[in-house]
Image (spheres, helix red, strand yellow):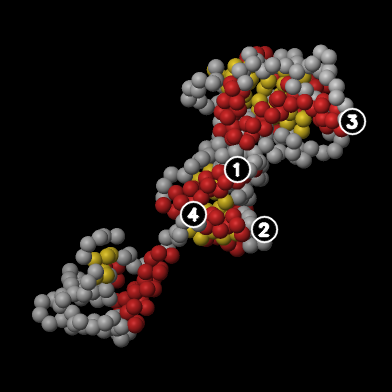
């Protein structure tokens, strides 16, 4: 687009009929005197030996050309001009599919940009809509990736992406050029609060008082079994958007923090040191509590197994708030049965939901919550805000937030 005396618009090949305006009855007024400049529908033939006007050289004058007759444009000209403009603008509109039927969410995401159209989809209509879609928000399936010939971007609602990368039954998304983004960091505050709540309930033995309340019993155990967190050591597996928030909270309780992460994490004063996953066994003997906040990837699959639980201090605590497949549940049960651990708090299990009769239910010193650590009164606002910003960036051709390395899985 050029600003000045005229506005140049690109004209698609389908508008070649502009060559024959005279034949269609759309006449161009004949000027008197020197050859005039091209008007909106009569491009200049200058430089064309055969005298054919170039359809792609149509220009819109900012004011009437003085060489032409002072006459109002015909209705046909106006209609054709509007058609050209509408075609040009619609070609820039991005079609974004949303895996949700929530009208409020659709409306909110649609407000992100006038250059995007957000279409809610279900299992019934997704294959009809995905063929010409530019983006997909939700948990996309391999067959949908294959059908989405124009897909450039997929946004998942959660922080974990294993469902669309490693557990979906195919590598179509992982090996494609489609950009994948997630909601990492967005739910970090809630999940970190939940992780510390689980630890505090265990370390203060608060779970025992729930039974006292049920029986209206005012009774203090002697000696009181609660421990002080100040001066203890926390090992955090996965120092990303969630693990970082846990580190700040553990540090605020006076704990010494050791991080375990495959990436080179920038220096943070609240973390004493960070080691690679192959050094996990070296730091576990220092742990008074182990937090699992790592995403589930082939590298992290059951990285907390029988040997790792054995290496933890006796009477230490285990907290899991990311994915249930990052630790081996049978090994956790065995460590609890022989009273090696003082307790465990898990918001994530494998499988989910945790079936009735599973041995993990029987322990008094195990707190189980149904994968709700990321929920709060503010998580939806941050999630929607991040997705809206990514929609705006997508239609403007700008770098997206929270881009996932699809080969690494985070």
Q: Earlier in the sequence, mark 4 or mark 3?
A: 4
Relative depth, front residue between 138 and 258? 258
Residue 39: image location, x then y, percent = 23, 74
Rounded to the nearest angstrom, the CA distance separating label 4 from label 3 is 53 Å
Q: Earlier in the sequence, mark 1 or mark 3?
A: 3
Q: Earlier in the sequence, mark 3 or mark 2?
A: 2
Q: Is residue 310 visible?
A: no
Rounded to the nearest angstrom, the CA distance separating label 2 from label 4 is 25 Å
Q: Nearer the viewer, mark 1 or mark 3?
A: 3
Q: Are marks 2 and 1 in contact (CB under 8 Å)?
A: no
Rounded to the nearest angstrom, the CA distance separating label 3 from label 2 is 49 Å
- Snapshot quadrant of residue 127: bottom right
Q: Secondary structure at mark 2?
A: loop
Q: Where 57 sits versus 236, above or below?
A: below
Q: Is residue 328 left or right of residue 171?
A: right
Rounded to the nearest angstrom, the CA distance separating label 1 from label 3 is 35 Å
Position of the N terminus, as image quadrant, is bottom left
The residue under the point 43% across, 65% down is 90
Q: Where 406 sits versus 259, above or below?
A: below
Residue tagged 3? 215
Residue tagged 4? 112
Q: Are marks 4 and 1 in contact (CB under 8 Å)?
A: no
Q: Nearer the viewer, mark 4 or mark 1?
A: 1
Q: Nearer the viewer, mark 2 or mark 4?
A: 4
- Determine which of the numbered discs, if any, sits on residue 378 in the image: 1
- Determine which of the numbered discs, if any, sits on residue 123 in the image: 2
């Amino acid at each position: 687009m050029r600003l000045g005396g005229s506005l140049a618009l690109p004209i698609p090949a389908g508008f070649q009929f502009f060559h024959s305006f005279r034949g269609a009855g759309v006449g161009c007024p004949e000027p008197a005197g020197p050859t005039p400049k091209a008007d909106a529908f009569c491009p200049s033939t200058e430089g064309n030996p055969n005298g054919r006007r170039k359809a792609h050289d149509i220009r819109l004058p900012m004011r009437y050309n003085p060489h032409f007759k002072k006459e109002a444009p015909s209705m046909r000209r106006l209609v054709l001009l509007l058609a050209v403009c509408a075609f040009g603008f619609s070609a820039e509109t991005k079609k974004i599919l949303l895996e949700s039927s929530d009208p409020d969410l659709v409306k909110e995401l649609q407000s992100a940009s006038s250059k995007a159209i957000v279409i809610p989809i279900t299992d019934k209509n997704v294959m009809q809509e995905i063929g010409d879609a530019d983006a997909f928000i939700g948990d996309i399936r391999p067959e949908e990736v294959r059908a989405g010939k124009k897909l450039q971007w997929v946004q998942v609602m959660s922080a974990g992406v294993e469902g669309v990368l490693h557990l979906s039954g195919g590598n179509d998304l992982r090996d494609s050029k489609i950009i994948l983004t997630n909601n990492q960091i967005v739910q970090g505050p809630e999940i970190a609060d939940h992780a510390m709540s689980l630890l505090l309930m265990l370390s203060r033995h608060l779970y025992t008082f729930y039974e006292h309340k049920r029986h209206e019993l005012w009774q203090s155990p002697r000696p009181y079994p609660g421990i002080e967190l100040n001066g203890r050591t926390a090992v955090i597996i996965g120092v990303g958007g969630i693990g970082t928030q846990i580190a700040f909270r553990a540090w605020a309780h006076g704990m010494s923090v050791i991080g375990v992460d495959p990436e080179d994490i920038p220096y943070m004063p609240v973390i004493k040191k960070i080691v690679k996953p192959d050094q996990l066994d070296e730091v576990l003997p220092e742990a008074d509590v182990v937090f699992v906040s790592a995403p589930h990837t082939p590298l992290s699959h059951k990285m907390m197994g029988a040997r790792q639980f054995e290496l933890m201090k006796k009477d230490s605590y285990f907290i899991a708030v990311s994915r249930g497949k990052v630790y081996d549940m049978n090994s956790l049960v065995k460590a609890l049965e022989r009273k090696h651990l003082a307790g465990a708090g898990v918001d994530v299990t494998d499988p989910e939901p945790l079936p009735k009769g599973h041995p993990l239910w029987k322990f008094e010193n195990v707190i189980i919550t149904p994968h709700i650590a990321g929920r709060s009164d503010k998580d939806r606002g941050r999630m929607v805000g991040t997705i809206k910003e990514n929609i705006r960036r997508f239609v403007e051709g700008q770098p997206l937030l929270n881009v996932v390395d699809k080969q690494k899985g985070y």
